[in-house]
Image (cartoon, rainbow, N blue to C red):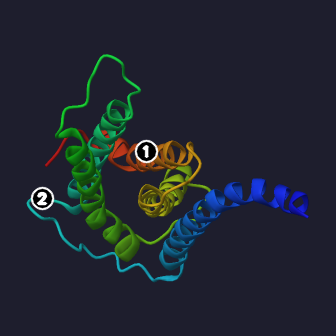
Amino acid sequence: MTTTNAPHAAIAPRWNSWAPLGAAVLIGAGLAVGLGAYGRVHDPTGETVMTLFFEQQITMKAWLATGAVLSVVFQVGSALVLYGKVDRFTAPSWLGDAHRISGTVALVLSLPVAYHCLWAIGFSADLGVTRVYVHSIAGCLFYGAFATKVIVVRSHGLPALALPIVGALVFTSLVAVWLTSAFWYFDTQGLQW
């Protein structure tokens, strides 16, 4: 009788580790789709929401997005050191805190940009303007991946590759957002404040 339970006991740990990951992915996907749907059905206002200390809203968005990308680049580098993937460096005691703070900074810098994009511009599904379409998809994907990463970081017993894969998705989607917006702006208009 105990032999009939043996296969289920061997399968249980795998299902227990994949179920929270599946839930995290579903929550992140729901957020990404929800943002895209809102941006698509919301009538864009076309208004300037804020400029902070910049002359134009577009320059504010470009510089805040650049700051967010730089924070995420630091996140990747610090994660490699923290997880022992860079043999030349030993992680200093402050690096874990700096890693978490840089993630928060990236999110905070991205929020005014995303707010303006969703509220004033909306989601562009115009396939004729590839840059804007990719930007819209990548922006929604970034927030979904970010939410998934936060859940994965706080979960225990997940597959070992879950965090690096979700982290890579956060990094890739934010870089895609930056390339299709801030980089494009700086390339066409030059560096402006």
In screen coordinates, is 29 left or right of 62? right
Residue hosting label 2? 55
Q: Amino acid at mark 1?
A: Phe
Q: CA distance from mark 1 to mark 2?
A: 29 Å
The residue closer to the viewer here, 189 or 173, is 173
User: In which quarter of the view is residue 125 placed?
Assistant: bottom right
Q: Amino acid at mark 2?
A: Glu
Q: Nearer the viewer, mark 1 or mark 2?
A: 1
Counting from the top left corner in percent of width and height, residue 159 is at: 59, 48
What is the residue that sits farthest to the top in this orientation? 88
Position above or below: 76 against 100: above
Helix, strand or loop at disc 2?
Answer: loop
Position above or below: 24 against 84: below
Position above or below: 51 against 158: below
Counting from the top left corner in percent of width and height, residue 140 is at: 49, 63
In screen coordinates, is 165 left or right of 8? left
The residue closer to the viewer here, 189 or 34, is 34
Residue shown at the point (30%, 59%) measured from the top left: 107
Counting from the top left corner in percent of width and height, residue 120 is at: 35, 74
Q: Earlier in the sequence, mark 1 or mark 2?
A: 2
Residue shown at the point (62%, 57%) measured from the top left: 17
Quarter holding the N terminus is: bottom right
Residue shown at the point (48%, 75%) measured from the top left: 39
User: In which quarter of the view is residue 14 placed?
Assistant: bottom right
Residue hosting label 1? 171
Residue shown at the point (34%, 75%) measured from the top left: 46
